[in-house]
Image: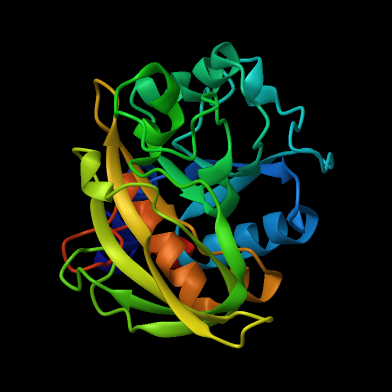
Amino acid sequence: MKLPLPRLLVALSLGAFPLFAASAPKPLRILLVTGGCCHDYPAQKDLLKKGLEARANVVVEHMHTPDKSTRPPLDCLTNPNYAAGFDLVIHDECAADVKDADLLANVLKPHRDGLPAVALHCAMHSYRVSPDFRTALTPGSAGAGWFDFLGLQSSGHGPQEPIAITFAEPRHPITKGLADWTTIKEELYNNVQPPTAFPAHRSLATGRQTTTNKKSGQTSESKSVVVWTNEFGPKKARVFSTTIGHNNATVDDARYLDLVARGLLWAAGKLDDSGKPLAGYGPGGK
């Protein structure tokens, strides 16, 4: 039976719809790890989830503990398969006194197997299995495991003061088109050794901070790398990191969320050379 032309066009369009829908990419499943000392993780985990899901086709799920110690009891410490089914892990935990190499091996297992990652703020000061973490550790040595993953070694920070962020690689997809900015009072994390000590490290932004000695009144300026990328393990898992993100107002800042969203998409291989999400991975699946 022949269909009239209008009905034929409708039928064809309806028939094509399932094929189109099936080809649309699924949201990336992101595991956000939070908990431990010194930060408002109950608020920040939700700020990150809301901000990232508004900027990319992702679904953020939480691995969170309300424990506020420097040894938070996170599942990733004892379960090496904690990231099964996820496309990327965001490490935003503060676990400075988790010093057992076997526990660190569990945390790193998915990334050694190739799973990409994002590391935020206090993640840089977590899993310090070497008592010599304040001195330059040789990349690839037993004590440098977490720093090898990050692609940078940091051991501490100064007082909270504004940080002037300058993007050093304006042509990189993560930073292309992003404007320099000065944060509210934040912590500038140090660089124990030149980041170039880590072979796959690539600096994207530096931070400058001016502090005043309360006793002498003298001012001093510190400078550190605050945004960078790395490749980790035999499968060269992509890792994006920033040391910025102590206070809630910073975590909720559109400039910060734009940066982290781009870093996430880059690490997952879903960011094009112009800094735009690949088709289907932008806001709302665009």
Q: Does residue 197 appear left or right of residue 14 in this picture?
A: left
Q: Position of residue 160 (x, y in %)?
A: 63, 73
Q: Position of residue 135 (x, y in %)?
A: 42, 38
Q: Position of residue 181 (x, y in %)?
A: 42, 84
Q: Does residue 132 appear left or right of residue 273 in this picture?
A: right
Picture mark count: 0
> Farthest residue in the bottom direction?
217
Q: Where 77 sits versus 95, above or below?
A: above
Res. 187 image quadrant: bottom right
Res. 162 image quadrant: bottom right
Q: Position of residue 209 (x, y in %)?
A: 47, 77
Q: Quadrant of the C terminus?
A: bottom left
Task: Please say which color scheme the image uses.
Answer: rainbow
Q: Does residue 11 appear left or right of residue 63 in this picture?
A: left
Residue at coordinates 25% horizontally, 39% vertically from top-left? 198
Residue at coordinates 77% horizontally, 61% vertically from top-left? 43
